Amino acid sequence: IAALVPDNTLLEITDHCYLRIDYSTRCDTDLYRNFVFPYAIVMIFVYPLGIPFIYFVLLWRHRHEINPTLPDGTRPHDPHSPEMDKVLDMRSANRNLLKCSFLFRSYEPQMWWYEVFECVRRLAMTSLIVLLNPGSTTQIFVGLILALVCVKMFGYYRP
């Protein structure tokens, strides 16, 4: 958001308004007002909301294939059991999962949703924290609380 802020200090000297982050971009043009600025505002919401949502939809649609049931109808929970090896073999053999396997490959089958949590965590730790007052104790406190919650989640779920 800070990248979209115009620098009006040069207005007196040049009679033009420039983007603070890139002085080669003028903010007083029709192209900037009608296309660049609205496009940037839309994209600010598309990525942070859209990517985790798309990941969740993909994983939700394939959750039963990512965490398949054994022939006896059970799902193992012990990551070191021979049954878990069978589940992982079933998952690896499924060709339908190739296109989204990068989202769950690193996690246990029952943790099919964990990459969405990781995506939201990364966005919160990099983008949400920036919106707080830079260098303030609030920013540091919120960052520490987020980090502690994420460590607790990782310790509890052991993905």
Image (cartoon, helix red, strand yellow):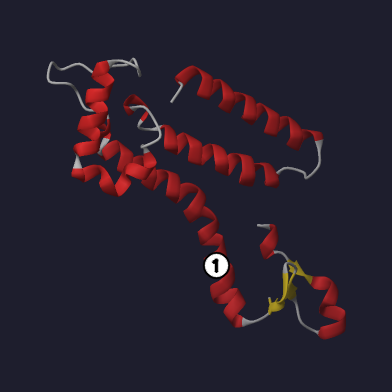
| Position in image of residue 49 (x %, y %) | 47, 47
| Position in image of residue 127 (x %, y %) | 62, 47
Residue visible at 58% across and 80% down?
31
- Which quarter shows the N terminus? bottom right
**Taking 116 as reference, is 131 left or right?**
right
- 4 shown above or below 82: below
Residue furthest to the bottom: 14
87 vs 3, nearest the viewer:
87
The answer to whether residue 64 shows anywhere in this view is no
- Which corner quadrant of the image does residue 150 belong to? top right
Residue visible at 87% across and 80% down?
12
The count of marks equals 1
Residue furthest to the left: 71
**Taking 110 as reference, is 140 left or right?**
right
Classify 10 Å Cα crowding around label 1: few (below 14), some (14-19), many (20 and above).
Answer: few
Residue visible at 20% across and 38% down?
93
| Position in image of residue 118 (x %, y %) | 49, 36
| Position in image of residue 112 (x %, y %) | 35, 32
The answer to whether residue 158 shows anywhere in this view is yes
**Taking 151 as reference, is 26 left or right?**
right
Residue of label 1: 38
- Which corner quadrant of the image does residue 33 belong to? bottom right
